[in-house]
Amino acid sequence: MISIYPESKYPIMGYRRYKMDGGSLVITEDHPDSSLNVSETTFSNPDSECVFLADKWGSNYWHWHFDVFPPVLFLNSFNKSLLKKAFMVSDKVLNVGFLKWWFDRLGVSNFMVGKEESRDGLSVVDFDWRHAGSPNPRVLEMIRSETLKSFPDSDLNILVQRGCQSREPKESRNIENRDEICEVFSRKGMPLTTVFLEAMSVPEQIDLFSRARIVIGVHGAGLTNLMFCKPGTVAVEIESPLASHCMYLRICALIGVRCASLLGDVTELRHNFFHQSLRVDPIGLLDLVELL
């Protein structure tokens, strides 16, 4: 067993959750500045012929980055030559193109996507990848160092929508009154560009968020891209009153992005409470962005 990284402490910037009440912003949760202890990262069997990555694969962009790639990144930091060898991974893979882009970037020319038969003789990275709903800050550091050599000028205010421009999903989380919101922000001199991440490549998404000055979006895996924002960017996550999570706010808090969440209003109940489209008070949203 070899130690790759010792136990470390990371600062967490404070953040708040808000809702609208009587036309005013009201704080529902207040998380002050704090810190996070991250346990030691270890590596076993450094002389093995293959590397076993993970048998638990997530089904979306969040899990690919924080469930699957941490072992790859840890191995890359430990011994780049190991990454030249074949990889054995689980067969629950939804986007091989995404994997290929990352492996190519890390210099891995030979990898297998298939169900593993046995772990015997395979190298395994052991780490605590999730901390109270937030990603491992060590993983954030590694992903950002691999993708962000420098930040371009911040010249975009973006409103993230799910689906693609020609086909928005009818049963998915989205902001129903986005035109009204865009009009309010435009009058204030902060025009919003609506973006559809599902129609964009990984490099395009990284470039988009690294240039963003303001990011507004409904809770969803696409907000994983907030980890590519520069410190000082303003981010507002629109949450449903039926389901809320803190992982995207915690990403922001770990990298110095000024963030908060705002509860939207469910306009139509659907069979899956994760797929409710929301209506957002545009004035309240503008006030929150200016507050941050």
Image (cartoon, rainbow, N blue to C red):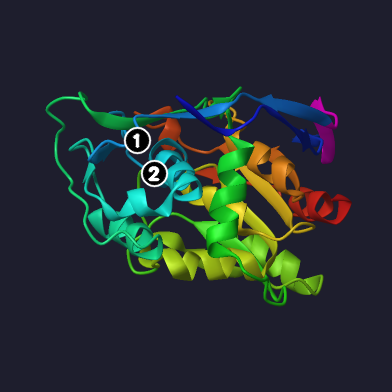
Do we see residue 239 in this rendering? no
Question: Which percent across, then down, holds residue 8?
Answer: 70, 30
2 or 1: tag closer to the N-terminus = 1
Q: Residue at x 56, y 69 (%)?
A: 208
* Amino acid identity at mark 2: Trp
Question: Can you identify the residue that label 2 sits on?
Answer: 64
Question: Which percent across, then down, holds residue 135?
Answer: 57, 35
* Amino acid identity at mark 1: Gly
Is 5 located above or below residue 223 in the figure? above
Question: Can you identify the residue that label 1 sits on?
Answer: 58
Total labels: the figure holds 2
Please tell me how crowded label 2 is: few (under 14), some (14-19), or many (20+) other residues with Cα within 10 Å. Answer: some
Q: CA distance from mark 2 to mark 1?
A: 6 Å
Circles 2 and 1, Cβ within 8 Å, touching? The answer is: yes
Residue sitting nearer the eye, 16 or 231: 231
72 on left or right of 287:
left
Quarter where residue 134 is shown: top right
Question: Which percent across, then down, holds residue 144?
Answer: 59, 56
Is 5 located above or below residue 158 in the figure? above
Q: Residue furthest front?
A: 47
Query: Residue 18 — which label?
Result: none
Please tell me how crowded label 1 is: few (under 14), some (14-19), or many (20+) other residues with Cα within 10 Å. Answer: some
Q: Residue furthest left?
A: 117
Label 2 sits on a secondary structure element that is helix
Q: Which residues are magenta?
A: 22-33
